Image (cartoon, rainbow, N blue to C red):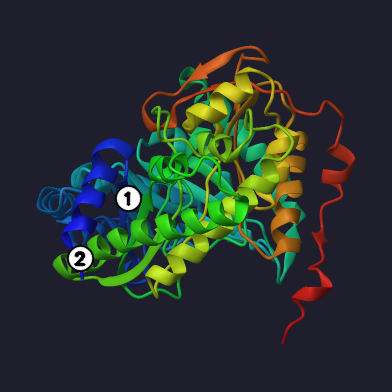
Amino acid sequence: MWNKFDVLETIDMIEREHLDIRTITMGISLLPCISGTPEKTASNVYELVCRRAENIVHVAEQLAGEYGIPIVNKRVSVTPVSLICAPFPEKAIMIGQALDKAADNLGIDFLGGYSALVHKGTADYEKLFIESIPELLASTKRVCSSVNIGSSKSGINMDAVRQMGEIVKRTADLTKEQDGLGCAKLVIFANAVEDNPFMAGAFHGVGEAGCVINVGVSGPGVVKHALENIPHANLTEVAEMIKRTAFKITRTGQLIAKEAAKRLGAEFGIVDLSLAPTPVMGDSVAHILEEIGLECVGGHGTTAALAMLNDAVKKGGVMASSHVGGLSGAFIPVSEDIGMIHAAEKGLLNIDKLEAMTAVCSVGLDMIAIPGKTPASTISAIIADEAAIGMINNKTTAVRVIPVPGKDVGDTVEFGGLLGRAPIIPVNPTDSSKFIERGGRIPAPIHSNKN
C-alpha cells in the first residue's frame, strides 16, 4: 500500500529528479498475418497492428494524467519480420513499409521488429531479408531493425557478423544526408531477449503471448539524488542505497504496467528497470558514477563502479516485482548521456574503455559515432568483440555504431531529441579483414553445455 510519504517522495522524484516511465511498449504477434501473397500479408500486418494498438497513445496519456507520472514514449514491437516474410523475402520492404504506415497512423514514436535471428546460421531467406535493412531504414521514419548474430548456447555466426558490417556501412551511406541516422535504428545483438521494450532493439519473441505490455522505467536522476544524500558512505552502503531506490522506481513501473495492460486488453509482460539516460542535465548514468567517486567517467575505477551500479539496480528491481525482465540495468549510449558526451569530448572515454564497461552493464556499445571512412570489416570486428563478451559471460550485448559519412575524429554530429549529439571517436586502425573473411562460426563456450 502507498502511504502519504511514498506519494510525496514519488512526486519529488518526478518533479526534481527526472523519474519517468520511459516507454510503454505493446508487443504484437504477427504470425496470424502470414498469407499467400506479400500484398495480403502486408495488408493483414497493417490492420492487426492498428487494431491492437489503437488506444496505446490515448491510454498512456490518460495514465500520465491520472497518476502524474510522465510517460515519454509509446511504442510497438512485433514478431521478427524475417519470419513473417519467409515465403517472399524479396518483398520484405513491403511489410516494413506497412509497419511504418501503421506507426504513423497510431502516433507512436518507434516500432521495433524488422529483425532476424541468425545466431546459429543464416537461411537463404534471412540473407535476402538482411540485405533489405538499409533500404528499409532509409525509406521509413519509425521502424527499427535488429539482428541477433550470436548466443551463449550457439556461438557466434561470423558469416552474419561479416554481413552486418557491410549492412551498417550501407545504411550510413543511404542516410548520409542525415549524418548516417539510419544506423541509430539498427542494433546487432548477441543473446537478444524477447521482451525488451527499449528501441532500437525491441522485438516480440515467438515465445510471448499474442499481445503483451512491457514497460521500461528510467530514473538516473533519482539514483544520483539518493547518493548525494550519503556523500561519506562506504561502497556497501552506496550499493544498498541504489538497491532501495531501484525498488521504489520499479514499484512505480509495475503500477503503470498493470493498469496499462488492463485498459488495453493485453497481458502484463515485464517491467524493465533500465537506467536509460537522456542528453538532459540531471538524467545521466555517467553522473551517477561520478557521484560514487570518479573524477570523470572513463577513468580507472569506472568499470568497477558500473558493475556495482548494474548489480544493485537488478537486485532492487527483482525484489519489487516478480516480472522484471527485458535488460534491466544501466545503459551507456554515448550520444544520449550528457556525462558520457562530455567525457568523450575530453578524450577520457574511448571505445576500448566502453567495451570493457559493456562486460558489466546492460547491452553494449551504444550510439557511438565513428569516422565515416571506417571499413566494414572493422565494424564487423567490433561486433564480433562485443558478441564474444556476451557469449562468454552469458549476457546480452549489442552494437549500435554510426559511421558518419564525411566526418572524422574531432567532428561532432547532432542527432537531436533523445538521440542527442556525439563527438566522432577513433577506432583502432589495424586491419581485421582477414579475420572477418574467414567466416564460419565461433563455437559456443564449454560452459554452455548445461543439458
Q: Residue at x 64, y 62 (%)?
A: 395
The circle drawn on residue 435 is: none
Q: Determine if residue 87 is in view.
A: no
Which corner quadrant of the image does residue 27 belong to? Answer: bottom left
Q: Determine if residue 243 is in view.
A: yes
Residue 405 in the image: x percent, y percent?
A: 60, 19
Q: Residue at x 56, y 15 (%)?
A: 412
Vertical side of 236 occupied by 103: above or below: above
Residue 136 in the image: x percent, y percent?
A: 45, 40
Question: In this view of the protein, which residue sits in the foreground, 212 or 423?
Answer: 423
Residue 196 in the image: x percent, y percent?
A: 45, 59
Which amino acid lies under the numbered mark 1 shown in the image of this protein? Thr
Which amino acid lies under the numbered mark 2 shown in the image of this protein? Trp
Q: Residues within 10 Å of mark 2 (few under 14, many from 20)?
A: few
Q: Residue at x 48, y 44 (%)?
A: 230
Which corner quadrant of the image does residue 408 belong to? Answer: top right
The answer to whether 297 appears left or right of 278 in the picture is right
Taking the view exactly as shown, the residue that stands out farthest to the front is: 232
Which corner quadrant of the image does residue 425 belong to? Answer: top right
Q: Earlier in the sequence, mark 2 or mark 1?
A: 2
Quadrant where the N terminus sits is bottom left
Residue indicated by mark 1: 23
The answer to whether 336 appears left or right of 271 in the picture is right
Q: Residue at x 79, y 75 (%)?
A: 447
Question: In this view of the protein, which residue sits in the foreground, 170 or 183?
Answer: 183
The answer to whether 224 appears left or right of 367 in the picture is left
Residue indicated by mark 2: 2
